[in-house]
Image (tube, rainbow, N blue to C red):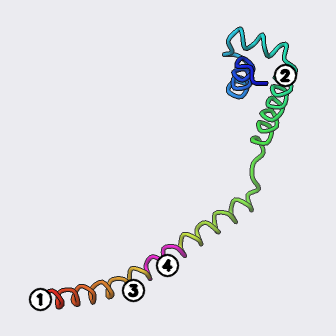
Amino acid sequence: MTDPTHERSIASIHDDPGGRNWEPQIAEHVSRCPSCQRTLKALQAFVDSMRSRRRQAAPPDLVARVCRTVQAEQSTAVRRRWRLTVAAIPVALILGVLVGMWIA
C-alpha cells in the first residue's frame, strides 16, 4: 500500500507500539487495517520477547572470559603501539638529520 495514512500508521506503530501517542486518524486506520494489525502484533511480540530476555543475566564465567579477552586485546594493542613508537623515533631523527644536511 502506498496510502500516506497507511505509511504514517506503520511509522507510528514502530515509534509507539502501545499506541499511547497516536493521532485519532492513525488509531482508526490501525483498527481496521489487517496489515497494520499484523505489524502491530508482530512488533508487540518482539518487544515482549526482548523484555523477557533482558531479565536474564549473563553467566558469570562468560562475563569473566569476555573481560579477560578484552584486557588481553588492549594489552596487545598497547604493546604494538609502543613498539611502533620506539621504532619510529630513531627513524624520524635520522630523517631530520638527513633533511637538515640536504637543506644546508
Q: Residue at x 84, y 31 (%)?
A: 42
- For marks 1 and 4, the one nearer the N-term is 4
Question: How far apart in space, not on screen, are marks 3 and 2 (Cα)?
Answer: 64 Å
Q: Secondary structure at mark 1?
A: loop
Question: How far apart in space, not on screen, are marks 4 and 2 (Cα)?
Answer: 55 Å
Label 2 sits on residue:
37
Tell me if mark 3 has few (under 14), some (14-19) or many (20+) residues whose alpha carbon lies within 10 angstroms of its own.
Answer: few
Near-viewer residue (43 or 61): 43
Position of residue 23 measured from the top left corner of the image (x, y, whole percent): 67, 12
Question: How far apart in space, not on screen, are marks 3 and 4 (Cα)?
Answer: 11 Å
Label 1 sits on residue:
104
Near-viewer residue (44 or 103): 103
Question: How far apart in space, not on screen, are marks 1 and 4 (Cα)?
Answer: 36 Å
- For marks 3 and 2, the one nearer the N-term is 2
Is 49 situated above or below 19?
A: below
Of badges 3 and 2, the one in the foreground is: 2
Q: In this image, 48 relative to 68: left or right? A: right
The amino acid pointed to by label 4 is Arg
Label 4 sits on residue:
80
Q: Secondary structure at mark 3?
A: helix
Of badges 3 and 1, the one in the foreground is: 1
Residue occupying the far front of the picture: 2
Of badges 1 and 4, the one in the foreground is: 1
**Residue 46's image quarter?**
top right
Is 73 situated above or below 45?
A: below
- For marks 4 and 2, the one nearer the N-term is 2
Instruction: State the predominant SS element of the stretch in magenta.
Output: helix
Q: Residue at x 73, y 20 (%)?
A: 9
The amino acid pointed to by label 3 is Ala
- For marks 1 and 2, the one nearer the N-term is 2
Tell me if mark 2 has few (under 14), some (14-19) or many (20+) residues whose alpha carbon lies within 10 angstroms of its own.
Answer: some
What residue range appears in magenta? Answer: 76-83
